[in-house]
Structures are given as C-alpha cells and as structure tokens.
Image (spheres, rainbow, N blue to C red):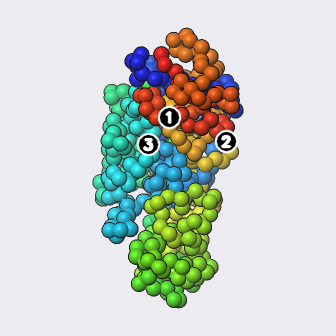
C-alpha cells in the first residue's frame, strides 16, 4: 500500500457536504475505535431503571432517540449489518442458524458462529477492510468475528463456548481489561466487543421483568467500568467508543386462544414440505416439494390472522430481506407477541425478537463518545445500516459498497479536531493536481460528482463503480 508503484485511493469532497472529504490520514494521527454491542437492549430499557453511566455518556457524547435494526431482527443478521452497512438480503447472513435445504442440515446459533461459509459469502466486514488498508483489528465474541473472509482472519479474536455464561459480571470486566490491552499493548485500531445481555435475561424472564431491569443496571455498571478503563489506559483522547445493540425485545403471548400452530392448520401437511425452518420465534421458511408450491401457498396465505405468509418474490420490499438465494420460496412472520409453532407447540421464552423492525419494541440503542464526537447531542432515529459508514469515516478507511450513507451520521462529528479531513482535497499527496477523470478507468468523467471505488483498486484490482450516491464520499484513484 505504501509503495510508489501501487494505486492509492484519494478522497474528494462528499456531494452533500463539500467540506467533508473521505478520510485519509497519517497513521500517527488516527484515532482508535471500539464498537460495543449489548445484545437485545431495547431502545427504552434505560427509562425504567437508574442508568447513571449511560446517562453520563449521552451528556458527554451522542445519543440517538432510537436506532432501527435490519429485518429480520435476529442476532447474527443484525450484527453483520452493523459491520457491513448492508441490508440482510445484500450480505446474506439471513438467519441465526446455518441451514442447507439440500442436505437438510440445520445448526444452532453457537455452532453457526464458526461456520465460515455461512459468513464468508461475498461481503467483507469492516475488520477485513480495515486490515487491507493497514490497520489492526480485533473481535471479542462479536458474531462473525471468528471466521475467515476470502482467506483472511481478524488480527485477534475470541469466541465464546457453547455453554458460555453471558451473565458473569466479573468476566465482563476481565474481557474489557483484555480489550484495553489489545489497544495499548497490541496496537489494535479497531475492536468489536459483544455482550450477550440483556438478551438472554429478556428471553428467559420477559422484557418487563424485574430480572431484566436488574440486568440493565449491570449493563450500566459495565459501561461505567468501560469508560473508567479507557481513561485509566490513557486512551480517552484517542479512542472513539460506540455502543449499540442488534434488536429490541417483546413479551411473548403464551396463553392466547389464537396461537400460530402449523400442526393445527386445516389442509396443511408437512408431507408437502421438502425443508422447514420453523419454531424459531416469529419467523419461518418453507421449501415445498416440487410441484407443490402453489398448493402450500394457497393453504397458508390466509390460514391465520396473526400469520403473514408470502411467496419470496411478493415479500414486502421495505424489509430488504427476501432477495437472496438462501431465502426459501415461502417465508413468513407473525404479529407482535406471537411465535410460530411447527410440528409441536412448545414455547419456553417469555421474551422474543425477530418481529417487524418498524415496531417500537424492536428498536434499539446508539450511543457514542470520544474525541471525534460532539457533546450532548441527541439525534433523530436512523437505520443501523448507517453505522458502518460512520465507523469507516472514524477509522480513515475506504468503505466497501454498502447501503448506508455517511451523511446520516456525519452531523454527530465535531466540525474540527475529529482527526479527518475538514476541507476538500485539490491535489494528490505528492502535490500534483487531482485529475478530472479516474486514472483507473479514464473513461468516467467526474462532472456528475466524484466516483466511489472499492478498496481492491488500491492494490491494482477491481473497477470503479457508478458515481457516488448523494451523501457518500467520492473517490478518485491516482498513481503516485
């Protein structure tokens, strides 16, 4: 990347914000970034318990009123959206479970965390993109962080065991200590840190339970410990901290007279089904046997007022979910509070997620603090796809193709002193004027705005994409 013989991506101004070019910085001035996820933290969990540390973080930095996760509101798909900036149909991690409709193999969540081909299916997460641009990254329990992508692993990673105790507060602090050492001793630039709570407690006891409230207080204590650790490690002036979650939580209706039970639907038989993925909260997929798709669809489409069944091509486009080869010809979701029962009616959880992401119970949190962020700012709700572009900006790296917009969260950053370019580039680092066309494919003029190019161009491969979307950083490739 540093050789004069290679191609270097040089930023131009964004289309909407001329004074905000794509970040290109020297290694010495780059701030570090820690992304922390507390699984299943509903957007309003901090409103019915005392959370002094989360409150202090909001005063010291940025808070969103809420953040809308991707659909389907499951752990692995939503976490992968955060580190790719893509809707689920575009990154392909469509479920918590690995499944294969041909072999009929279905693997549980923890086993799926280690299935490389489930995650490495064409989308590069931010760890790998950052590493290919000279940074060092780490993943501590974060979904997708323990496999390789195009043969490349995260610099440092930890994966929890199958029977991992997500509630252990002592271990939480030890994990934070390890992450601080990754920054200070190992020189990492980006770390993603995952906690499995308050999701587990919300599932077991329900989102309105006292146990959930106590777990949120534990989360808050951990946020306090984390920020103290950042200060004590001498990182406060050089580390940006973002705290998010993947989805919310809602109470399960276990006693209703109108439960969604496939084994009780008139004229439906599993003999017509080649592959099924049911009994996983409010979502389901079906692959009917050859020649039986229409029959099964006609039986199911109006079979239950709480169940919404679609052919793949008719699934609501607003979910950005169904347009992927892994999604089966029939898919469905149920109303809030209702789960889908397949061959048996068994439901242990008192809380569930996976519901329509437009429902408030599925909304989640966004907090940010650090040298690059404004103080005391509350922003309007936004979709989680936009976090990726923000993180790339903070790290000074060129993002992969994604569905987010930098302009959405750019106002959360300080006007000056955020460690990134505050004025448009007019020359290359060698002092030469910027060309009017991309030197990688000179046929494309810049008259309609800067172009975006994939990071692979920086190593001499790949091609330029179409002119940048509104608000996205534009790029031109120059040879130094």
Residue 345 at x, y percent in the picture = 45, 80
Q: Quadrant of residue 173?
A: top left
Residue extending farthest bottom: 266
The residue tagged with tag 1: helix, strand or loop?
loop
Contact? badges 1 and 2 (CB < 8 Å): no
Q: In the rendering, at what x and y percent does residue 124 appear?
A: 44, 42
Do tag 3 and tag 2 residues touch (Cβ < 8 Å)? no
Numbered label attached to residue 463 = 1
- Of the pair 359 and 20, the residue shown nearer to us: 20
As helix, strand or loop, the secondary structure at mark 2 comes to strand
Q: Where is residue 322? Give x, y as percent.
A: 54, 61
Pick the front one: 306 or 349:
306
Residue at image x 46%, y 60%?
325
Q: Which residue is drawn at 59% across and 19% down?
A: 435
Between the residue at mark 3 and the residue at mark 2, the CA separation in whole angstroms equals 28 Å
* Of marks 1 and 2, the one in the foreground: 1
Is residue 60 shown left or right of residue 160? Answer: right
Q: Which residue is drawn at 60% across and 52% down?
A: 68
For the residues labelled 1 and 2, the Cα–Cα distance comes to 36 Å
Asked if the residue at tag 3 contacts the one at tag 1, i.e. Cβ–Cβ closer than 8 Å, the answer is: no
Mark 3 or 2: the one toward you: 3
Q: Give the residue at mark 3.
A: 124
Residue matched to label 2: 379
């Amino acid at each position: 990347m540093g050789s004069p013989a290679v191609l270097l991506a040089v930023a131009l101004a964004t289309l909407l914000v001329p004074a905000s070019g794509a970040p290109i910085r020297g290694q010495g001035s780059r701030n570090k970034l820690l992304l922390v996820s507390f699984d299943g933290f509903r957007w309003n969990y901090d409103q019915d318990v005392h959370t002094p540390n989360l409150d202090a973080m909001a005063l010291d930095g940025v808070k969103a009123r809420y953040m809308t996760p991707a659909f389907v509101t499951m752990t692995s798909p939503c976490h992968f959206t955060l580190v790719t900036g893509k809707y689920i149909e575009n990154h392909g991690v469509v479920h918590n479970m690995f499944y294969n409709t041909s072999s009929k193999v279905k693997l549980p969540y923890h086993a799926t965390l280690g299935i490389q081909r489930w995650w490495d299916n064409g989308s590069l997460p931010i760890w790998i993109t950052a590493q290919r641009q000279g940074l060092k990254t780490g993943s501590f329990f974060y979904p997708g962080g323990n496999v390789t992508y195009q043969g490349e692993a995260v610099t440092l990673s930890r994966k929890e065991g199958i029977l991992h105790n997500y509630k252990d507060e002592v271990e939480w602090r030890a994990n934070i200590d390890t992450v601080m050492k990754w920054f200070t001793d190992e020189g990492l630039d980006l770390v993603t840190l995952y906690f499995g709570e308050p999701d587990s407690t919300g599932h077991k006891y329900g989102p309105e339970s006292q146990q959930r409230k106590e777990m949120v207080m534990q989360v808050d204590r951990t946020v306090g410990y984390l920020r103290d650790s950042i200060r004590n490690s001498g990182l406060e002036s050089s580390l940006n901290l973002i705290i998010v979650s993947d989805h919310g939580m809602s109470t399960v209706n276990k006693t209703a007279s109108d439960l969604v039970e496939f084994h009780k639907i008139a004229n439906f038989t599993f003999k017509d089904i080649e592959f099924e993925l049911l009994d996983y909260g409010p979502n389901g997929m079906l692959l009917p046997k050859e020649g039986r798709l229409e029959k099964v669809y006609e039986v199911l489409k109006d079979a239950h007022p709480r169940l919404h069944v679609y052919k793949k091509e008719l699934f609501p486009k607003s979910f950005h979910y169904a347009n992927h080869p892994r999604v089966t010809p029939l898919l469905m979701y149920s109303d809030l509070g209702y789960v889908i029962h397949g061959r048996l009616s068994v439901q242990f959880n008192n809380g569930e997620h996976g519901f329509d992401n437009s429902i408030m119970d599925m909304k989640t949190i966004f907090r940010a603090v650090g040298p690059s962020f404004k103080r005391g700012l509350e922003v309007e709700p936004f979709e989680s796809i936009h976090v990726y572009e923000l993180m790339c900006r903070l790290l000074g790296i060129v993002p992969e193709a994604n569905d987010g917009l930098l302009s959405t969260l750019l106002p959360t950053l300080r006007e000056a002193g955020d460690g990134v370019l505050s004025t448009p580039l007019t020359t290359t680092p060698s002092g030469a004027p910027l060309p009017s066309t991309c030197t990688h494919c000179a046929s494309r003029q810049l008259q309609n705005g800067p172009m975006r190019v994939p990071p692979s161009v920086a190593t001499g491969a790949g091609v330029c994409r179409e002119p940048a979307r509104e608000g996205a950083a534009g790029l031109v490739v120059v040879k130094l």
